[in-house]
């Protein structure tokens, strides 16, 4: 099985999640399934084409960020709304209930192995951000349009691009920073290329989160004999979610250690008062999501309420 992704081999999701997953599938199938990982788009195309590639059978499996392709799975963006994400466990477990309820149509062209999130993103910049006004005019890379909406609401200038383009953009000064979790930051040298790491006040210190999907081509899954389907099933969905939670919690800690390894780097938590101002300023983002859902014939307000309830249910 050819597994395609946009990240390089040293990146935590590849090294600590995809490689162990591929090895376990191989072991559980007694060598009858071999998952070959092709990182950094080695099989061709752009990161924005991964959903299309796995749907059309160009590749057998893809690990990607649906947010790269706005409009394909817009309902997932509810989890990227500000102050929605509470914990890795909360969001990953919430997704396991949210998708069957709201997104059967969107996932119908695929065999879903897992939808999950990272531990939540923070602001990583070359210049300090100590108050909401400091966002004004700052050019920041974002992974998805929802985060771009948050940045726009704060007065920043977002550039939505894949992670692979971030290092040259920082070197050229095209952007002054990015919205990222700690875990992925070492792979794009944020400890060297930026100096300020800004979170919000507790209890929800992260700016936002992103949803990732591990998808299999539907026909390829259907073509497997029953016993090998069972191997895939045993390594997906509810069986795989706890592994994703543990992995992303662990690699987040490791990534933060790398960021803190440079004495030049400063770590800032916005005050409760600034976080309250932040919350007020980003309220239009919720309305944008509700309007987007209305265009898709869905009830955005209800989705927000359900996602919040699920996050609270699984929060630890």
Image: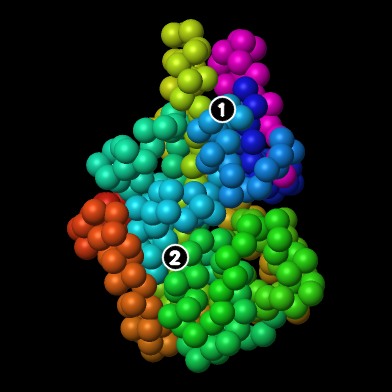
The picture places residue 44, in percent across and down from the top left corner, at: 71, 39
The secondary structure type at the circle numbered 1 is loop
| In the displayed structure image, the side of residue 191 where residue 24 appears, left or right | left
Tell me what residue is drawn at x 45 percent, y 74 percent.
150
Disc 2 and disc 1: Cα gap in Å? 29 Å
Residue 197 in percent (x, y) is at 61, 75
In magenta, the rendered stretch is 23-40
Q: Earlier in the sequence, mark 2 or mark 1?
A: 1
Where the N terminus falls, by quadrant?
Answer: top right
Q: Is residue 144 above or below residue 94?
A: below
Q: Quadrant of residue 185?
A: bottom right
Dot 1, crowdedness within 10 Å: few (<14), some or many (≥20)?
some
Picture layout, residue 58 above or below residue 263: above
Q: Which residue is labeled 1 in the image?
A: 57
Q: Is residue 151 shown left or right of residue 19?
A: left
| Residue at image location 42% in from the left, 61% down from the top | 80
- Quadrant in which residue 259 is drawn: bottom right
Residue position marked by numbered label 2 in the rendering: 146
Q: Report x, y in % for residue 266.
A: 66, 79
Work out whether residue 212 or residue 54 is closer to the camera in this orientation and state it.
54
Residue shown at the point (58%, 87%) measured from the top left: 137
152 w.r.t. 5: above or below: below
Q: Is residue 1 left or right of residue 290?
A: right
User: Tag 2, which secondary structure?
Assistant: helix
């Amino acid at each position: 099985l050819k597994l395609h992704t946009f990240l390089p081999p040293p990146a935590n999701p590849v090294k600590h999640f995809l490689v162990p997953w591929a090895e376990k599938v191989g072991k559980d199938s007694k060598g009858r399934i071999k998952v070959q990982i092709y990182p950094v788009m080695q099989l061709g195309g752009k990161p924005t084409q991964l959903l299309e590639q796995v749907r059309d059978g160009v590749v057998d499996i893809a690990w990607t960020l649906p947010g790269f392709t706005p409009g394909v799975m817009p309902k997932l963006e509810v989890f990227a709304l500000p102050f929605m994400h509470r914990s890795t466990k909360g969001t990953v477990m919430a997704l396991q209930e949210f998708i069957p309820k709201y997104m059967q149509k969107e996932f119908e062209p695929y065999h879903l192995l897992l939808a999950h999130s990272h531990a939540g993103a923070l602001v990583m910049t070359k210049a300090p951000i100590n108050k909401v006004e400091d966002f004004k005019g700052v050019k920041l890379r974002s992974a998805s349009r929802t985060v771009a909406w948050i940045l726009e609401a704060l007065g920043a200038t977002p550039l939505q691009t894949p992670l692979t383009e971030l290092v040259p953009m920082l070197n050229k000064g095209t952007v002054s920073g990015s919205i990222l979790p700690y875990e992925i930051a070492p792979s794009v040298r944020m400890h060297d290329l930026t100096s300020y790491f800004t979170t919000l006040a507790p209890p929800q210190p992260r700016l936002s989160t992103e949803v990732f999907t591990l998808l299999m081509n539907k026909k390829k899954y259907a073509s497997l004999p029953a016993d090998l389907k069972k191997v895939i099933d045993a390594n997906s969905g509810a069986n795989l979610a706890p592994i994703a939670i543990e992995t992303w919690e662990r690699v987040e800690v490791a990534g933060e250690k790398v960021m803190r390894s440079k004495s030049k780097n400063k770590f800032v938590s916005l005050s409760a008062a600034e976080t309250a101002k932040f919350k007020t300023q980003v309220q239009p983002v919720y309305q944008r999501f509700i309007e987007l859902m209305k265009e898709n014939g869905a009830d955005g307000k209800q989705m927000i309420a359900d996602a919040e309830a699920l996050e609270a249910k699984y929060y630890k």
